[in-house]
Image (cartoon, rainbow, N blue to C red):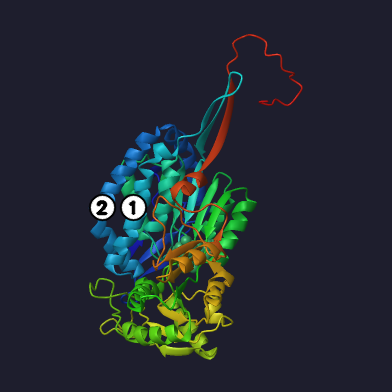
């Protein structure tokens, strides 16, 4: 059985540092265990942190331009290895190859931003803030940062975190999802190949035990987490209690509002990809569609049914497949259970994806596409995240009712409105209580130089991922007030708080 181990600086891999616990990594196309991942413990983390602590000051003292050159070299290496990485990712996650490449590419765009880190780190300077006095600020690294990542973007989300953390001069410990851990390790190997000094990026596998050890470790100063909301909340509270800076992104239930004037063919095309792409396992998927008005709802339903029934579910290397399997058998069971809950709650199951079997891959974790109509906001299957290939139609009578649905939902990650009416779109974008809004854009994941982050139970902490928010999260500001007196007495009263008046 293939073993996936931690990526540690050389002197950390000493006997006795590994817990002996392992986790299964599946091939979701066939339902078999393809590898085992070694799960680490506190003792291992302690050693890794000690190495990181020793390596970090020299890295922080390396000028930003040199640090940026490593980012450039890394980007070139990832591009060179794109096919290998995409196949590796797809084989553990189950997303189709083109989508796996998108996962890697979106992460690389954050690395491209990090190539400009010298510019982003320039501080502020005020000459002559008082007599002979100048004030300036510097952004200093936190020291050691850690990232805890979910299974659904095993390339992009680690890069969201380690790119800005390392570019700003921190050492970084990555704890990727134990369900698809190979790509994060490979990315870290490529960072070392690009010239990153040993100890600045280490990958430690694990589960709750390792997460808790990270949250409690006094030398880890910042933690970035992405995953489900209950765990995000837990991570946030425990990390903040331990005195750390924490950003913790959680789950989602994104709505697509369809106004009566929308181009329905375009909407159906956009919704098919946004609801079912990656088997719905995206935090920016659109699992809820809200048409405004009965006429819009009926027309949309009529067009959606054949589009959904025509989706091709296939193994992740099938170039014709729209989407592949979900990540594990237990996740498949959970998605199918949510479909049953929707039925029990009285929603109309128009297309039923349960019990789907792919010929020749009967043990794979496939779920066919499902469509519900007449879903009500009071239903549990609407309130919670399903994270599978299930689209729920919640009809609204008016723009105001449609606006209220995502605004009142517990999650506030993303939302989209489809319309030709600029005024309605502008009004919606300003008033909806959600962090990321798409106007005729079904998956409004902001570009790398803007920032990513939801509202309400979709994110705990107040700093977003990547862009300048990422730089801010991984640095602390030091402000220096300096005076170079010319020797003559300035006549001020040293017992009074100095003012610039
Ligand atoms: P998850 O919460 O199960 O796991 C995320 C991480 O937490 C993993 O590294 C895992 O090892 C760790 N973990 C699991 N259980 C833990 C526990 N009890 N205590 C401490 N740590 C624990 O999430 P997942 O299933 O890997 O990912 C899917 C979830 O992530 C979905 O809810 C999705 O919406 C969310 N997500 C959110 C965003 C965002 O930016 N808001 C992006 C991607 C995914």
Depicted 458 relative to depicted 60: above or below: below
Are discs 1 and 2 less than 8 Å apart at CB? yes
Residue tagged 2: 79
SS under mark 2: helix
Asked where in the image residue 158 lies, by quadrant, the reply is: bottom left
Secondary element under disc 1, as helix, strand or loop, is: helix
**Rendered residue at 28%/52% (across/down):** 78
**Front position in the image: 178 or 400:** 400
Q: Which residue is mark 1?
A: 108
User: Residue 153, percent across and down?
Assistant: 39, 62
Q: Is mark 1 within 8 Å of ligand 1?
A: no
Real-space Cα separation, disc 1 to disc 2, in angstroms: 9 Å
Looking at this view, name the residue that lies furthest to the top. Answer: 488
The residue lying toward the viewer, choosing from 20 and 366, is 366
* In this rendering, position of residue 317 left or right of residue 390: left
Please name whichever residue, 81 or 350, is drawn nearer the observer in this view of the structure: 350
Q: Within 10 Å of the Cα at label 2, are there few (<14), some (14-19), or many (20+) other Cα atoms?
A: some
Q: Quadrant of the C terminus?
A: top right
Specify whether residue 227 is in view.
Answer: no
Vertical placement of 62 versus 383: above or below?
Answer: above
Place of residue 65 in the rendered image (x, y in percent of width and height, measured from the top left): 36, 35
Residue appearing at x 26%, y 47% in the figure:
76
Residue at 60%, 14% (x, y): give it: 485
Which residue is at 38% across, 57% downward?
A: 156
Judging depth in this view, the residue of 14 and 133 nearest the camera is 133
């Amino acid at each position: 059985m293939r073993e996936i181990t931690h990526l540690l600086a050389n002197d950390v891999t000493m006997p006795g540092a590994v817990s002996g616990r392992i986790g299964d990594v599946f091939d979701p196309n066939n339902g078999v265990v393809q590898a085992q991942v070694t799960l680490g413990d506190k003792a291992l983390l302690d050693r890794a942190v000690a190495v990181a602590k020793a390596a970090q000051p020299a890295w922080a003292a390396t000028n930003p331009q040199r640090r940026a050159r490593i980012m450039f070299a890394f980007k070139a290496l990832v591009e060179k290895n794109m096919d290998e990485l995409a196949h590796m990712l797809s084989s553990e996650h189950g997303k189709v190859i083109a989508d796996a490449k998108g996962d890697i590419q979106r992460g690389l765009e954050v690395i491209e931003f990090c190539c400009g880190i010298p510019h982003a780190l320039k501080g502020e300077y005020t000459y002559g803030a008082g007599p002979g006095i100048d004030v300036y600020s510097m952004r200093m690294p936190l020291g050691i940062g850690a990232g805890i990542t979910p299974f659904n973007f095993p390339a992009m989300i680690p890069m969201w975190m380690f790119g800005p953390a390392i570019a700003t001069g921190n050492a970084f410990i990555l704890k990727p999802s134990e369900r698809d851990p190979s790509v994060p390790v490979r990315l870290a190997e490529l960072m070392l190949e690009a010239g990153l000094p040993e100890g600045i990026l280490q990958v430690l596998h694990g589960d709750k035990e390792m997460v808790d050890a990270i949250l409690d470790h006094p030398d880890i100063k910042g933690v970035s987490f992405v995953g489900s909301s209950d765990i995000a909340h837990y991570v946030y509270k425990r990390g903040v209690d331990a005195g750390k800076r924490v950003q913790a992104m959680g789950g989602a239930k994104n709505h697509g509002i369809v106004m009566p004037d929308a181009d329905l063919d375009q909407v159906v095309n956009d919704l098919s990809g946004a609801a079912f792409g990656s088997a719905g396992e995206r935090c920016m998927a659109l699992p809820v569609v809200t048409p405004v008005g009965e006429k819009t709802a009926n027309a949309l339903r009529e067009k959606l049914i054949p589009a959904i029934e025509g989706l091709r579910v296939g193994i992740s290397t099938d170039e014709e497949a729209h989407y592949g399997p979900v990540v594990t058998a237990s996740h498949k069971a959970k998605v199918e259970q949510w479909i049953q809950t929707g039925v029990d709650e009285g929603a109309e199951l128009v297309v039923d994806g349960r019990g789907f079997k792919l010929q020749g891959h009967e043990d794979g974790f496939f779920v066919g596409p499902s469509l519900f109509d007449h879903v009500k906001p009071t239903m549990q299957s609407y309130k919670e995240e399903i994270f599978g290939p299930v689209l729920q139609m919640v009809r609204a009578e008016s723009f105001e009712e449609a606006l209220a649905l995502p605004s009142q939902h517990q999650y506030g990650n993303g939302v989209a409105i489809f319309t030709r009416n600029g005024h309605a779109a502008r009004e919606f974008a300003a008033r909806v209580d959600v962090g990321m809004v798409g106007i005729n854009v079904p998956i409004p994941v902001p570009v790398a130089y803007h920032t990513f982050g939801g509202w309400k139970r979709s994110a705990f902490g107040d700093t977003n991922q990547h862009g300048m928010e990422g730089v801010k999260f991984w640095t602390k500001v030091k402000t220096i007030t300096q005076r170079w007196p010319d020797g003559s007495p300035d006549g001020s009263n040293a017992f009074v708080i100095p003012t610039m008046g």
